[in-house]
Image (tube, rainbow, N blue to C red):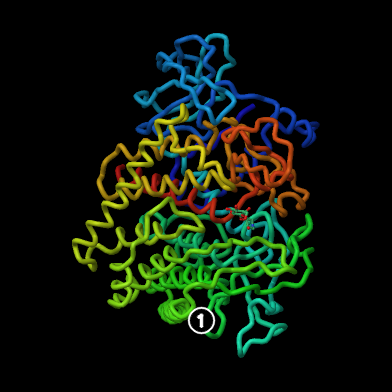
Amino acid sequence: MHFFIHSTAVIRSRHYFRVLFALLSFISIIGCSEDNSKQKYTEGQVNKSVSIKVSQVGYLPAGSKYAVVPSKSANRFVIKREVDDAVRYEGVLNEPENWPLSQEPNLRSADFSEFTEQGMFYIEIADLPRSVPFIISDRVYAGPHIAAIKSFYFNRSGTELDATYAGKWAREAGHVDEVVTVHSSATASSLDSHAIVTSQKGWYDAGDYGKYTVNAAIATYTLLAAYNQNSQYYESLIIDIPETENGLPDLLDEVRWNLDWLATMQRYDGAAFHKLTTLHWPGKVMPHEDSEPLFVIGVSTSATLDLAAILAVASRVYQEQDPDQAKQWLVQAEKAWEWAKENPNTPYVQPDDVQSGEYGDNTFDDEFFWAAVELYLATEDPRYLSHLSNSHVEFTVPGWANVETFGLISLLTRGKVSLPSALYEKWRQKLLTLANDIVEQTTTSPYRVPMEEADFVWGSNSVLLNKTIVLLAAHRLTDNDNYLKGVYQSIAYIFGMNATGYSFVTGIGSKTPMYPHHRISESDKVEEPIPGMLVGGPHSGHQDNCTYPYPLPADSYLDDWCSFSTNEIAINWNAPLVYVLGEVNAMLEERE
Ligand code: 9MR
């Protein structure tokens, strides 16, 4: 049996959200009747190969629509309506295409982009099992978008999750972080090692319980950028979290949980602590069972500049709602900038007694650029503009180690009025060049996504979504709908139209990860993982030493706790998912 999110209704009331939430809970137990154990579910899901791959969340009526099928198939495909099996569309498959990154060397695609009828359909091709049913509707991304935001709430540190909001994933508070010790790597003249600081709230970074300034800053930025681009849309979007009734947009409330923590990560002299973790990886335990001592560890130029950038952004976004706090964040951001100017080359160095994640980086031009952009937009101080004008940074796909394009996107969104026009035009061209290159890459695979061999790194799904953010920025700048094709195709890839046949978001789709490398999902005794979390995706590095049946880059994914290099979740992977779905939803609403 298959079940899909279908939200033809406006998800703008608590009622609809509750319905959606119930559906989400239901989706993730598909295949589990009462006598079905988790093991049986797994066998069915993992061993079931998908011969006609479709987007398991469905398609937008006006969006591009592809399905991918093995080369040994008949030439024709038909689309039938689920309710009465009526043929609604017929087409011819494209010629086989070779993709050396996957063990299925030749694949054909069915292009039904011109089919715009709304409803529930499936694809039939002679001699192949029919596809799973899929929906065509303007609302197909509404539920997944809300679930992707809600996953941040599920990963809140320092608070219990009440069943009213968390349903069966309610849990006790962990890591209240009232006692955090300063590690010897983070001391300064007036801050001894073993001093105690407090540093509450925040989101867990990923499958572990660490909190890392660099990654938290970019994830928070991505969500605030989503809000900035589409504030009207987010004004009334309800996520159903404890703050829902407070009159502020839920997205800003959720982001605030992390901002409050991030602001505590600044040392008295302006430097940012690089991370807050235990010394060793936590066991497979719930947050409240992880009783190892917590430390703030290291300071770095990258963490300090990323903190400067995100607090400057926050000072703009929350200016109206909380002016005093906004002012304080801006003071902190400027202090961080000053520290970085005096310490422009302080990389994070992992101390010998520390095991947690590194987010290590040795080049800081990109962080200087991003921080200067956000500080300029917040203050209009010409010092920052002069830094930007003299910067020779190369613009690349954004990620935690390359943040300059976040700055570029902010500049182009907010900067037109306050920038000299020659500079604005220069940066506009830089963004379009990057976007055009990404568009080119969509022709390299039968899945029509901009994924090249070098992109199948740890967290490859986020590489794709960050490229999609660049495409959306180019679309905003030019109004050229051509950029949107890559956006729709990338979303379809994330939700199942990829070499593995998995929809990579927990609980959403007909074949989804059941064993993400996520300590809460692994130890909460609830059969289904927390919903709405994007796993890292295929990556042939295999650093976790699990056994991968299919070693080629695009296939190399394992739905197993063991596979932390392909099946972990992380806030900087979910944030671009939120951004992309939110922007498309907002765009559709504007066009209505
Ligand atoms: O996302 C990070 C990836 O780019 C790195 O290759 C990998 C190894 O250094 O680390 C990933 O980040 C992990 C972090 O260090 C600790 N929390 C879990 C993160 C996701 O796996």
Q: Residue furthest bottom?
A: 190
Secondary element at image label 1? loop
Ligand 1: give its quadrant: bottom right
Residue marked by disc 1: 270
Q: Nearer the viewer, residue 167 or 380?
A: 380
Looking at the image, can residue 167 be seen?
yes
Please tell me which residue is depicted at 70% across the width and 44% down the height of the picture.
563
Q: Nearer the viewer, residue 454 or 207?
A: 454
Please tell me which residue is depicted at 35% across the width and 67% down the height of the picture.
373
Q: Is residue 16 above or below residue 80?
A: below
Q: Position of residue 110 (x, y in %)?
A: 44, 20
Q: Nearer the viewer, residue 276 or 532?
A: 276
Q: Is residue 64 left or right of residue 55?
A: left
Residue type marked 1: Gly
Q: Position of residue 216 (x, y in %)?
A: 55, 63
Q: Quadrant of the C terminus?
A: top left
Q: Is residue 48 above or below residue 559?
A: above
Q: Quadrant of residue 547?
A: top right
Looking at the image, can residue 231 be seen?
no
Q: Is residue 183 above or below residue 17?
A: below
Q: Quadrant of the N terminus?
A: top right
Please tell me which residue is depicted at 50% across the width and 58% down the height of the picture.
401
Q: Is residue 284 left or right of residue 472?
A: right
Q: Position of residue 572 (x, y in %)?
A: 54, 55
